[in-house]
Image: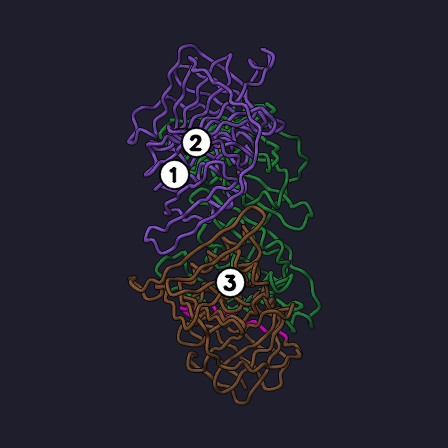
Chain colours: A purple, B brown, C green
Amino acid sequence: MLELRLVQGSLLKKVIEAIKDLVTDANFDCSATGLSLQAMDSSHVALVALLLRSEGFEHYRCDRNMSMGMNLNNMSKMLKCAGNDDIITIKGDDGGDTITFMFESPNQDKISDFEMKLMDIDSEHLGIPEAEYHAVVKMPSSEFSRICKDLSSIGDTVVISVSKEGVKFTTRGDIGAANIVCRQNKTVDKPDEATIIEMNEPVSLTFALRYLNSFTKATSLSESVTISLSSDLPVVIEYKIADMGYIRFYLAPKIEDDEEEIKS
Amino acid sequence: MLELRLVQGSLLKKVIEAIKDLVTDANFDCSATGLSLQAMDSSHVALVALLLRSEGFEHYRCDRNMSMGMNLNNMSKMLKCAGNDDIITIKGDDGGDTITFMFESPNQDKISDFEMKLMDIDSEHLGIPEAEYHAVVKMPSSEFSRICKDLSSIGDTVVISVSKEGVKFTTRGDIGAANIVCRQNKTVDKPDEATIIEMNEPVSLTFALRYLNSFTKATSLSESVTISLSSDLPVVIEYKIADMGYIRFYLAPKIEDDEEEIKS
Amino acid sequence: MLELRLVQGSLLKKVIEAIKDLVTDANFDCSATGLSLQAMDSSHVALVALLLRSEGFEHYRCDRNMSMGMNLNNMSKMLKCAGNDDIITIKGDDGGDTITFMFESPNQDKISDFEMKLMDIDSEHLGIPEAEYHAVVKMPSSEFSRICKDLSSIGDTVVISVSKEGVKFTTRGDIGAANIVCRQNKTVDKPDEATIIEMNEPVSLTFALRYLNSFTKATSLSESVTISLSSDLPVVIEYKIADMGYIRFYLAPKIEDDEEEIKS
């Protein structure tokens, strides 16, 4: 039997909104340690990994490991019916073919339960090794979102280059070219507004803006975002989820010839 | 001659927005007691009845009874040109084929008059007898609107069931099923936020959500809505209009076999 | 060499939004006195004239006169990437085929530069003689915008008539007719909220609402608008730009037979 009670139900609403455009169907894996998900996007280019640790729930009961296949669009329709201040409880029976979302309004006036059919989804769980990255950039998530959106009006890809002074985002398109430089800045009022660069060696990688823009749907989950770059690894874009866990997006860089990279 | 001066002109704007999607053309009946309207929707399933009593107008002159056929879409276009704080005066001549809406801005800087052509509309006035209802539910109008909208993302019809403890809204669709229970709650700060159940006998009726969602366009007119249910009568959804009158929507329940009703 | 630094960068953003729907491509003329533009709309019915005087820039360097052809839609895409509080610097080389927009965030954390290709655009500069007008109306720009928008829901053209008491806007369409009168009003808290009529002789002219609605895209640039009317001249609709200059729109009146004008 499964019963997960999340006081800050809006977190679950935001998590699903953050990934439903990237992933249509996915298995939610529930174990004693928490609720997790790992899925590729439909074009098998990007990977999303979600973790909500059991400690983050007010009540967490998971008698045995369960993998529950859900259509994220349907799940989104149901969670949109929860108020932003509602407590959300996820309930399921071992081996059942449905799951129930219960929403309780703060003053307990209104109790809703939504029952959703589960699906069988084939998936293989990829092991993602911990890695050392050439550079790790922590910056305000709204700033990163704004930059990806702005550059999309000029070009299709972005070169992200990290040096000690800052991180540079470069694109080029039919109407011209654009460079945006964000400087390291630790002297801000709130820690989440800082831009912090940790760099072992300079790195410059090219990504499709389409995917980055999809990842930034998670912006409302966290004030800051962490971008981990290495020349031989997929980039990791991580949004922390309060004290509970994270959403991580992985995306392989595009290979371009050196001359092109120097030009841009 | 007709001259009706309404200081809170935004009420008239809201009234038209509330019914124009349901009813295209309708006769406004003006008599010494007030301005009223009764019309079926185009599919002849729902009925709307409007009353604005003469006492609610700052100035009310109606020399003899008039029935004025108006296209509600055109009327809406004109009333949208009135500011929300404008005073609206409706003027007409006996037997004239036009009506004039005059808008005065609060500081009298700006005076507008919009002349609209009247139409001949066949209509028969239905007598609606006062009836005893099995159950009457008064609840916040925004809550009722939210529930109808939320359930529409799951199913096409809703079963409304009233018991002493509360009112339950149930739907079922391809992606799953939903139950929303609102408990009786009289201990609130504002009377309009209360949920109050008056029940003579339990009742459970099925309605098309499409119509209910159309009725909730009247939500901005009143903080609370009253739902009167009987197993052998159309439901009445009433929104009070300040001290002036009301909009009432009537909708016949859908007939379903008993087993289906028990299941949902 | 050209280098124009504008501290209130949002002004440039608003200027481009105000004219880009009317004019697709235009030459920006840069001289020692300022940055200016003059262009006809694509149907050669309306003319827009822009002036941003050099004194309005924090830094203004223009070594020799330059005429720079720009696609306003592309320019808009780039300027939308500037924050509303950003400082914008326009940079160009003599005879170069690109121009650079540099955006600096207020705290200098983020520096962007956008390079746009210039175009060759044929244009002849029209001399616009200073003229005496029969009537000049100054009114709140938001009120003028609201009136043009409101009347568009009724008719296609507007008759603007000025008398000592006020300015009247009249339209007529299939669903009826509308008159809006704004009275002279100098006794307001803020000068920009005044409606002031200066009249040498009464005037009544007809204009296409489509163009007026396009001009009102400049509403965010100025709290008030000035409308200068003469029976034998195009109307001038002017929005002042802070202490820097103006946008002026010129539109020829529509010729209608006298009877039609009297009727409306």
Q: Which residues are magenta?
A: B105-117
Chain of the residue under label 1: A
Q: Amino acid at mark 3?
A: Lys
Q: Majority secondary structure of the magenta segment? A: strand
Q: Quadrant of the N terminus of chain A?
A: top left
Q: Is residue A199 visible from the viewing direction of this image?
A: yes
Q: Residue at x 38, y 38 (%)?
A: A4
On the image, the x and y values in percent for residue A103 come to: 40, 48
Q: Secondary structure at mark 2?
A: strand
Q: Is residue C139 visible from the viewing direction of this image?
A: no
Q: Residue at x 39, y 34 (%)?
A: A62
Per the image, the residue denoted by label 1 is A4
Foreground residue among B10 and B44:
B44
Crowding at dot 3, Cα within 10 Å, few <14 / some 14-19 / many 20+, comes out as some
Crowding at dot 1, Cα within 10 Å, few <14 / some 14-19 / many 20+, comes out as many
Q: Quadrant of the C terminus of chain A?
A: top right
Chain of the residue under label 3: B
Q: Would you say the residues marked 2 and 1 are in contact, meaning their CB atoms lie under 8 Å apart?
A: yes
Q: Amino acid at mark 1?
A: Leu
**Distance between mark 2 and mark 1 Cα atoms:** 10 Å
Per the image, the residue denoted by label 3 is B217
Q: Amino acid at mark 2?
A: Cys
The reply to whether the magenta stretch includes residue A11 is no
Per the image, the residue denoted by label 2 is A30
The reply to whether the magenta stretch includes residue B114 is yes
Q: Quadrant of residue B54?
A: bottom left
Are dots 1 and 3 on a single chain?
no
